[in-house]
Each structure stands twice: as C-alpha cells, then as structure tokens.
Amino acid sequence: MAGQFSLIAPFSMLVLLVYLSVEAALARRKLKKVPVRVAISGIRGKSSITRLIAGGLRAAGSKVMAKTTGSRPVLIYPDGREVEITRRGRPTILEQKKLVAAAVAEKADFLVSEMMSIQPECLGAEGRYLLQPQVLVLSNFRVDHTEFLGRRREEIARAMLEAVPPGTITFIPEEEVLPWMEPLARKKGFELRAVRSSSESARLTEILPYPEFEVNVRLALAVLEHFGLTADRVRAGWSGLNPDFGRPRVWKIVAPGERHFYLVSLFAANDPESSLLAMELITRRLGWQDSRKIGLLSLRADRGDRSQQWAGFLQSGEADFLESLILVGPGAGAIVRKLRKRARETGRPVWFLSEGEPEKNLEEIKNLVTSCQERWPGSAEKCLVFGLGNIGGFGSRLIDYLERTADAIRI
C-alpha cells in the first residue's frame, strides 16, 4: 500500500504541473489578443482610478474592457455598459481569466483592471500570469490588511513592489516614494514613475460629477497622457463618468422633534487614515467643517485586523473630534466596553447598535443622534453622521435602503 501511495503522489504532482502549464499557455495566448493591459493596485482608490482610466480611453475612441472589484465587483464594457459580477462563494483571482476572455470576445484594444489580491504571493501571480500588464498603477500604501501585508507603511510598500512584474511601467504618487524603491525597481526590472500634483489634475478633479481625491485623478491622468491623450480629451470623457458604488454620498435624515441630520457614507474608505481624508474632503467641499460630527462604525467578522486597527485609533484620542460613536457589527460590543472609560472622561457617549433590518437600525440611529442633539445648545446646528469602517454587510444594506427612501444631497 505504501508503494502505491509513493507512485500516486508523484503522478498527481505531474498531472498538476501539466495542467498549470496548459492553463498558463492558454492564458498567454488570450492575453496577446488584448494589445494593452493596465492594472491598478494599492490600498485605497483602485476602483476610482480604474474608472477614470477606462473613461478617458473610451472618450478617445478606444475599445476598453474594464473591471472594478471594490465595493461591488463590476464589468464595464466598451460601450460603457456595466454588469455586476455575481459570485458563488469567496472571490478568487482566477476571476481575472473571465475578464480576459470577455476582453477578447469584445475585441478590446485595452484591458483596465483593478487587482484583487491582498496576499503578496497571489498579487505576484495575478500580475505575472493572469493579467501581465504593461502599465501598473500603485495608488498608496496605507495601513490595512495588516495580517498579510505588515503593520507599517513601509512593509506594505515593499510587499507590493516586490510583486510588480518585470518590464512594467509603474506609476506611483510622488509623496509615496521612498529612497529604496528606485534601486528595487532596477533590480526587479521595472520602471518606476513618480507622479506629482499639478494644476491640471486639480482642475480636472473639479469637473468630475462626484467627489474625488486629486491623487487618484493625478495618477489616472498620468497613465492617459502616457497613451497620448491630452487633458482636453480626458475632460470630455470624465464630465459624465459613473462613480463607484462605494463613492461618498450624503442624505438628509428627518429625525424626531423636528430635527434633522446628514448621514455621510464613507464606509468604503475602510481604514482610519483614509476615512479622515474622506471626512476632510466632504466637509470642505460642502462647507461643513464646523458641524457637529458623530461616527457610525460598521465592523465585519472577516476583517478582524481592521476592527483592531479602529479600536486602537479610537482609544488613542485621535477621534475625539467626534461628539459620539455608534458601533455595529461583530466585535462591536467588546470595543464599546473598551471605550467606555474614555467616553466618561471626554463626555462623548459610545453606543452599541445591534445589527438588524436597515429600517429598524435607521430609527435607532435617529433616536441616538437626537439624544446627542438635545445636549447641544442651538439644536439647529448641522449634525453629520459619518458611516465608517466597512461597506460590506451593514454598510451596503444601509446605503441601498437610504437610496430608496431618503433625500440625497448633491456633493
């Protein structure tokens, strides 16, 4: 019996190697039928950059097949039509094979795709074998997915740059560049291009029909200029661009006692650093910098590292500008208990919200916000409730409900 197993194991490995070799050959053959491939990686902003690049290329008359995988996975066809991807089970990078097949079927000139991987090994495989991009964008290296990428910004940057395929032209924001990156790029055989802010990228940010970070616009513009597009041509493609599902949104919520507040969805920002930047963007855009602010933090069972990151951030005092906190989701109760002492010291209440149907949860949020407003002099003051943490689960359901029932505010 032992002898049988000793024969089976090598044979099985041989079969696996043959299968993988055939799959790689088929993938390479299909990829060659799509002349230009662009991949977008990094921690935040990938979906936005993907849409900006694809929209600019479409405006120039190119046939573009694109895919975002962020808040909701979507295929974007050459005519701009969007089809949400239905998944059976957990996401897998092999999903990119279907994107390549769709690009070939559409006879696309360009394939523009957000990369799916978090683990460095998968990130390398996705780039080298599944997409093989000639151009890669690295958006930023903010601290998130710490169980795979590391707990420091530099560790995350190194993990992502180590996975860059040789021969790739890689665009990165100038402010993210570190001294060791250029030598690493030369060693690995790819070109690193630092992209600095410009007056043109600032102007283009303002013409978008939704709030966007200048750095995302800057990176997309640099890629489009690399392909020979002018800023005027880009402007025409971006003026009516569809935003991602996870974009910032604002609704006016009518509460008991003839009061109201504004619920601002920043659920897709995920990590504390990105959330603070998004808060600053929205409050500055709407002139609401001095408004009262409440945090609505949604946690997920499969994002335990992110929950711990938020717990540390809230305990550090960096979030003391929030008048109160409402926490919902797995692990929220434990974090609320940890924050109770600080809440007593600062006089800022912390509440636990039991996750349920969006309609019921919204009523509970209204009551909690109203109790805060009653403690403030001048109840007519604007109050902003920021949805934070995670868009999956509670965040997504609440957004869908508010889109159907609440008054949206143009931002």
Image (cartoon, rainbow, N blue to C red):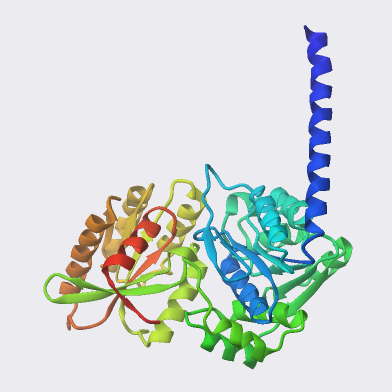
Q: Position of residue 96 (x, y in %)?
A: 67, 53
Quadrant of the rendered image containing residue 113: bottom right
Which residue is the extreme one toward the top? 1
Q: Residue 6 sits in which quadrant?
A: top right
Q: Residue at x 39, y 73 (%)?
A: 249
The residue lying toward the viewer, choosing from 322 and 409, is: 409
Point 27% across, 52% down: residue: 357
Residue depicted at x 35% and y 74%: 250
* Residue under the point 42% across and 80% down: 282
Residue 182 lies, with reference to residue 16, above or below; the image says below
Q: Position of residue 99 (x, y in %)?
A: 66, 56
Nearest the eye: 349 or 167: 167
Q: Nearer the viewer, residue 224 or 125?
A: 224
**In this rendering, is residue 382 above or below 184?**
below
Q: For this view, does 377 lie left or right of residue 135?
A: left
Residue 158: x percent and y percent? Answer: 73, 60
Residue 97 place in picture, x, y as percent? 69, 51
Image side of residue 73 versus residue 376, left or right: right
The reply to whether residue 160 is visible in this rendering is yes
Q: Is residue 82 left or right of residue 100?
A: left
Confirm whether residue 198 shows in the render.
Answer: no
Q: How many marks?
A: 0
Image-quadrant location for residue 157: bottom right
Name the image quarter holding the C terminus. bottom left
> Could you tell me which quadrant the N terminus lies in?
top right
Compared across the picture, whether 393 is left or right of 47 comes to left
* Most foreground residue, 393 or 52: 52
